[in-house]
């Protein structure tokens, strides 16, 4: 309702014929009763349609872009949160949407991207379609990369291990799980025969059962818990997949005491204080941050030589 009461903009598209333009004007007058005129935009029908699609495509692109960089950060020892903050200060880029995570979800991003890709291919623009399809591919890759990190960090097997999954909604403050990255990650871990203890403060048990019902053997490998502490009891690892504020307020000393050892935290939202968790005794793996030394992947090849690069770098405006 807040979006309706105080929207950033209203876009009304219509065909060029007289009746359509009259309808556009009438609708604009209706919105003008509470929305400032400068926020009411009118356009052609196709312009409005492509605006809707590309707005979400651009936001998804930003998420996939920072997620791609997060993988490089992990290899080089950079911190993706520092990188995101620094580039976000650039007014040409801005800070919104540059948050590394397990990937984007929700009904709009992927559906609108696929609609845009379909239009591009329909109008014989394969290069444009391939460009936007890569945004989806990076998102899928990020989810697989996170699941693979869980397996490789836990001594290359999660079979029979209890994993506490905190968060199933695609973002906090909603029960919406459509296209949630949590489902793909859970299915990947189920295929590795992990035992999942799931908890989300809003998502119903029926929705969880339905989403995971296609995975073979799910009933024996999945349990839905009523609180985070029960889900964590006896677990070998915690997986943070939704950025619920509740998860940042949990008593992690109590959780650590109840878990199997070594106890891992895989923070897919970079929500928690990793240094504090390490002080408690957890092995911590975040997104785009330096993993614990014992968990770091060995480099596939020697990194490029820094040449004459100074130990202190300073960049001005470009």
Image (tube, grey):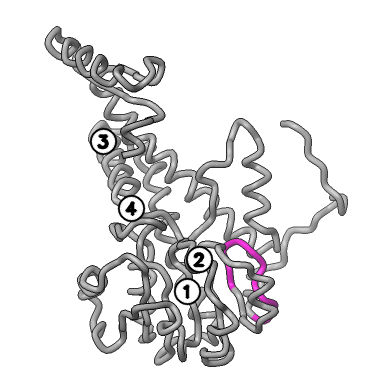
Q: How many marks?
A: 4
Q: Residues within 10 Å of mark 3 (few under 14, many from 20)?
A: some
Q: Which residue is mark 3?
A: 119
Q: Is residue 156 above or below residue 302?
A: below
C-alpha span from label 1 to label 3: 37 Å
Q: Is residue 140 above or below residue 37?
A: below
- Left or right position of 252 against 128: right
Q: Which residues are magenta?
A: 285-294
Instruction: Looking at the image, tell me whether mark 2 or mark 3 is earlier in sequence order.
Output: 3
- Does the residue at mark 2 contact the one at mark 3 (Cβ under 8 Å)? no
- Can you give x and y, in whole percent of width and height, for residue 289 in the image? 64, 64
In front: 273, or 221?
273
- Magenta stretch contains residue 111: no
Magenta segment's dominant SS is loop
Q: Which residue is mark 2?
A: 268
C-alpha span from label 4 to label 2: 16 Å
- Can you give x and y, in whole percent of width and height, for residue 195 in the image? 37, 86
The answer to whether residue 126 is seen in the rendering is: yes
Residue lying at 34% horizontally and 56% vertically, measured from the top left? 174
Q: Residue furthest left?
A: 19
C-alpha span from label 2 to label 3: 33 Å
Q: Residues within 10 Å of mark 1 (few under 14, many from 20)?
A: many
C-alpha span from label 4 to label 3: 21 Å
The answer to whether residue 308 is seen in the rendering is: no
- Does the residue at mark 1 contact the one at mark 3 (Cβ under 8 Å)? no
- Does the residue at mark 1 contact the one at mark 2 (Cβ under 8 Å)? yes
């Amino acid at each position: 309702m807040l979006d309706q009461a105080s929207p950033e903009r209203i876009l009304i598209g219509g065909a060029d014929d007289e009746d359509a333009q009259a309808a556009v004007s009438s609708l604009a007058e209706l919105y003008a009763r509470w929305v400032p005129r400068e926020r009411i935009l009118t356009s052609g029908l196709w312009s409005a349609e492509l605006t809707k699609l590309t707005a979400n495509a651009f936001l998804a692109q930003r998420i996939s872009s920072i997620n791609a960089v997060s993988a490089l950060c992990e290899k080089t020892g950079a911190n993706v949160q520092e990188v995101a903050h620094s580039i976000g200060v650039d007014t040409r880029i801005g800070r919104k949407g540059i948050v590394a995570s397990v990937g984007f979800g929700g009904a709009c991003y992927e559906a609108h991207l696929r609609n845009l890709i379909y239009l591009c291919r329909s109008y014989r623009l394969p290069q444009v379609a391939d460009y936007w399809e890569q945004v989806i591919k990076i998102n899928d890759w990020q989810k697989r990369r996170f699941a693979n990190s869980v397996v490789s960090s836990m001594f290359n097997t999660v079979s029979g291990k209890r994993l506490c999954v905190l968060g199933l909604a695609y973002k906090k403050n909603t029960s919406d799980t459509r296209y949630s990255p949590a489902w793909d990650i859970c299915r990947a871990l189920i295929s590795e025969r992990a035992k999942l203890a799931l908890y989300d403060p809003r998502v119903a048990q029926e929705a969880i059962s339905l989403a995971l019902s296609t995975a073979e053997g799910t009933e024996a490998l999945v349990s839905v818990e009523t609180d985070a502490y029960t889900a964590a009891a006896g677990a070998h690892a915690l997986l943070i997949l939704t950025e619920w504020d509740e998860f940042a307020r949990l008593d992690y000393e109590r959780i650590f005491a109840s878990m199997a050892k070594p106890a891992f935290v895989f923070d897919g939202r970079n929500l928690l204080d990793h240094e504090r968790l390490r002080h408690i005794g957890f092995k911590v793996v975040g997104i785009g941050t330096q993993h614990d030394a014992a968990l770091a992947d060995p480099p596939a090849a020697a990194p490029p030589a820094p040449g004459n690069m100074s130990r202190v770098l300073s960049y001005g405006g470009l």
